[in-house]
Amino acid sequence: MVRKSVPLIPVILLATACLGGHGAASALQAGEPQPAASFALYVLSRGKGVPEPARNVLRDARAMLEEAKQEGKVVGLKQTRLGLEGETRLCAEFADREAAGEMRERIARLMQGVELVNLVVEPCSD
């Protein structure tokens, strides 16, 4: 009888992930503050510069995020130029997840139908 062995590394990683998630849930239940939420808006190009509709989304999203910053909802806002043709990353960090979710939805509506614009949930750190 040939017995197949189960690789231990995937099993160990799965168990670690499950325990880690449980620990995180316990910390949140214990009243620990949730980490600040963040996302980045990318405007890109196809070799001819960032198209005007994408630039307009960036401009309008930046204005909305600046207003939210004045209201105390945004705690960090960083714009970084990525390429030679105006490609840009605009990243916002929020005081809470609810404010981040609401703003993500507003910006997603703003960018509907506009090419070369991406909204990515990710940390703002470099």
Image (tube, rainbow, N blue to C red):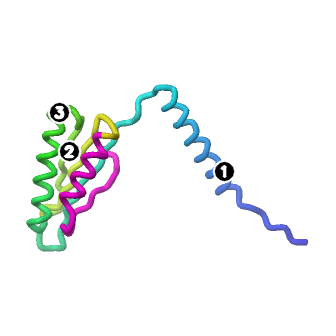
**Which amino acid, by three-letter code, is at mark 1?**
Ile
Q: Give the CA distance from mark 1 to mark 3.
A: 45 Å
Task: Determine the residue positioned at 17% across, 36% down.
Answer: 69
Q: Give the CA distance from mark 1 to mark 2.
A: 38 Å
Question: In which image quadrant can residue 66 be found?
Answer: top left
Give how far across and how far down residue 97 sits, in percent.
34, 40
Q: Report the front residue among 31 and 109.
A: 109
Judge from the rendering whether residue 97 lies leftward or rightward of residue 117; answer left or right. right
- Residues in magenta? 99-125
Seen in the picture, residue 115 relative to 63 is either above or below; the reply is: below
* Upstream in sequence: badge 1 or badge 2: 1
* Upstream in sequence: badge 3 or badge 2: 3
Give how far across and how far down residue 90 sits, in percent.
20, 51
Q: Give the CA distance from mark 3 to mark 2.
A: 17 Å
Circle 2 sits on which residue? 78
Of circles 1 and 3, which is in front? Answer: 3
Of circles 3 and 2, which is in front? Answer: 3
